[in-house]
Amino acid sequence: MRKSSLFFAIALFIVGTLSATPTEDLEPTKKLSYQILKMLETNSFDIKDDMVADVRFTINKEGEIVVLSVDTEVEVLENFVKARLNYQKVELENAREGQLYTVPIRITV
């Protein structure tokens, strides 16, 4: 019992440390991935299996994500990703309008 409590405390510390990482220290693509993670973090899926998707998007001149496609077989995931990401403002240095990005998304059980 004590070993599992210690493991839980260590795991909680590591997760807390990683989630507190400031985005200013990340390279631009990791910073973008981190911002997308935060946008998709809260969900209410009742899933039985892992869900995956490849999201293709661009950044418009206002600094907003424009979702071009969500490659997945799960329609609920596709709609969720589009609703959460489309026209959300992101901070990205050196972003060029029209540049294509692809981000893999995985929601696990």
Image: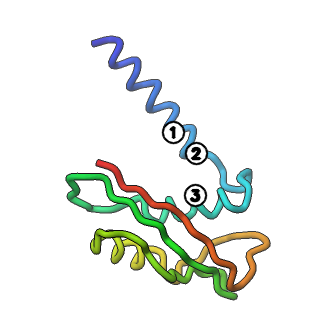
Q: How many marks on residues?
A: 3
Would you name the residue on which mark 2 appears?
20
Image position of 20 (left or right of 93): left
Would you name the residue on which mark 1 appears?
16
Q: Please state which amino acid type lies under the numbered disc 2.
A: Ala
Q: CA distance from mark 3 to mark 1?
A: 15 Å
- Badge 3 or badge 1: first in the primary sequence: 1
Q: Residue at x 38, y 60 (%)?
A: 52
Q: Is residue 27 above or below residue 64?
A: above
Q: Quadrant of the N terminus?
A: top left
Q: CA distance from mark 2 to mark 1?
A: 6 Å
User: Where is residue 6 shown, x and y percent of the image?
Assistant: 40, 17
Instruction: Pick whichever, 4 or 74, lies toward us.
Output: 74
Helix, strand or loop at mark 3 = helix
Name the image quarter holding residue 30. bottom right
Residue pushed farthest top?
A: 2
User: Where is residue 64 shown, x and y percent of the image?
Assistant: 60, 81
Q: Please state which amino acid type lies under the numbered disc 1.
A: Gly
For the residues bearing labels 2 and 1, Cβ distance under 8 angstroms? yes
Q: CA distance from mark 3 to mark 2?
A: 11 Å
Q: Which color scheme does this rendered protein use?
A: rainbow
Would you name the residue on which mark 3 appears?
34
